[in-house]
Image: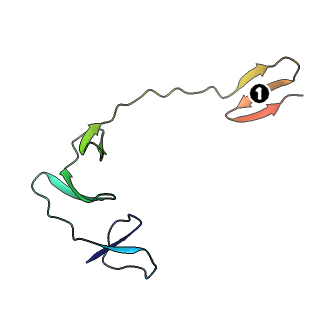
């Protein structure tokens, strides 16, 4: 018998703390398939991941290709002058008030 706690990957023994539940043994995967623990629902038999940039969609129960997005690089600092205040320079998330 296997045990899981809070959706953890099943294992043959517990650590003795409360909250462990018994789960069934994993099913046997056929050719071109694999068995994974996905909580919920539990054991999932699914096709092996295709070559490339794919992720498993449990809600659709299929592999979906991930679309890459272009990443913009922020400048190292931005100088801003606000009316009635000192010049403020923002350096990657930290604000410094200039003298």
* SS state under label 1: strand
Residue 19 horizontal side relative to residue 62, left or right:
right
Q: Position of residue 37 (x, y in %)?
A: 29, 60
The residue labelled by disc 1 is 89
Q: Between residue 69 and residue 21, name the one nearer to us.
A: 21
Q: Between residue 56 and residue 51, name the one nearer to us.
A: 56
Q: Between residue 52 and residue 61, name the one nearer to us.
A: 61
Answer above or below: position of 55 versus 82. below
Scheme of image coloration? rainbow
Answer above or below: position of 17 versus 33. below
Q: Position of residue 52 (x, y in %)?
A: 26, 38
Q: In the rendered view of the protein, which quadrant contains the N terminus?
A: bottom left
Q: In the rendered view of the protein, which quadrant contains the C terminus?
A: top right
Give the residue at x 14% y 59%. Answer: 29
Q: For mark 1, does the 10 Å Cα neighbourhood hold few (<14), some (14 to 19), or many (20 or more) residues? A: some
Q: Position of residue 41 (x, y in %)?
A: 29, 58
Q: Position of residue 68 (x, y in %)?
A: 38, 31
Q: So how many labels did they put on this image? A: 1
The quarter of the displayed image where residue 94 is located: top right
Give the residue at x 80% y 33%. Answer: 96
Farthest residue in the bottom direction? 16
Farthest residue in the left direction? 31
Answer above or below: position of 11 versus 75. below
Q: Between residue 62 and residue 49, name the one nearer to us.
A: 62
Residue 83 horizontal side relative to residue 10, left or right:
right
Give the residue at x 87% y 22%. Answer: 85
């Amino acid at each position: 018998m296997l045990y899981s706690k809070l959706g953890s990957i099943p294992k043959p023994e517990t650590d003795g703390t409360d909250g462990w539940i018994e789960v069934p043994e994993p099913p046997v995967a056929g050719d071109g398939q694999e068995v994974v623990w996905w909580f919920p629902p539990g054991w999932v038999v699914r096709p092996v991941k295709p070559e490339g940039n794919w992720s498993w969609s449990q809600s659709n129960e299929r592999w979906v290709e991930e679309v890459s997005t272009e990443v913009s690089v922020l400048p190292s600092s931005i100088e801003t002058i606000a009316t009635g205040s000192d010049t403020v320079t923002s350096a990657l998330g930290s604000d410094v008030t200039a003298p």
